[in-house]
Amino acid sequence: MTRKKLFIFDLDGTLADAYRAIERSLNFTRSRVGLSKVSYKEAKQKVGRGDRIFMETFFPPEKIKEALLIYRKHHKRTLKIHSRLRPYAKQMLMRLKRKGKLTAIASNRPKLFTNLILKTLGIRRYFNMVLCADEINSNKPNPKILNVLMKKIGTTKEETVFIGDMDIDLETAKRAKVDVVFIKGGSSRPSVVSKYKNAKTISLLKELLRLYE
């Protein structure tokens, strides 16, 4: 097996837990436009494809533009209060850096909120590059985001692994033809892994190091 040089991470559900912030901003927005609340579980299951698509899931077409403006304004505040690192995230990132590995973020979140989470959680310095879907006008599972990262950082597909918590992360890696690791506890159920024969599964981020040492 080719040694991995580049570890690309999804953000939400993989390194960070911002589900409570998402649920609060969503329900604040729904209340502002006269809609009832949705459950935390339902909100968690629908994230990961960018906030515009998220709005399309929970609001009628004529309300989406208004809802997106309300949601984004409210979300700037709630992310600072309710974002958390997943267990062992910082320790794992520090260890990868000590080993001389390259690291990156590939997120469907807008750049503004991705950077806000990274700053709030104090982990931006651990990444060689951060790339968001709105910067390249292409959302996962389109593999463009991974291909751009590999090209700019200078690694091959064989030297790269993508780590995520959703079915779209697995599909993105498959289309980009890179190895993928699925972490449990995010938005997608572990059963989605069965569709991807080469996917590895972990429960905690510290297990990632054992796979590639």
Image (spheres, grey):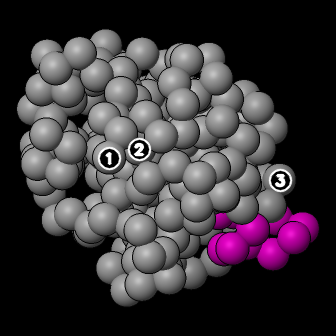
Q: Amino acid at mark 3?
A: Lys
Q: Amino acid at mark 2?
A: Val
Name the residue that disc number 2 marks: 161
Q: Earlier in the sequence, mark 1 or mark 3?
A: 1
Q: Is residue 168 above or below residue 36?
A: above
Per the image, label 2 sits on a secondary structure element best described as: strand
Name the residue that disc number 1 marks: 1
Q: Residues within 10 Å of mark 2 (few under 14, many from 20)?
A: many
**Residue 58 is a magenta residue:** yes
Overall secondary structure of the magenta section: helix
**Residue 62 is a magenta residue:** yes
Per the image, label 1 sits on a secondary structure element best described as: loop
- Residue 136, numbered label: none
How many numbered callouts?
3
Distance (Cα) linking label 2 and label 3: 36 Å
Per the image, label 3 sits on a secondary structure element best described as: helix
Residue 11 in the image, given as x and y percentages of width and height = 41, 44
Chain part drawn in magenta: 54-63
Report if residue 95 is visible in the image: yes
Tell me where residue 171 sits by quadrant. bottom right
The residue lying furthest to the right in this view is 62
Kindly indicate whether the residue at mark 3 contacts the one at mark 2 (C-beta within 8 angstroms).
Answer: no
Residue 107 in the image, given as x and y percentages of width and height = 54, 42
Q: Nearer the viewer, mark 1 or mark 2?
A: 1
Name the residue that disc number 3 marks: 65
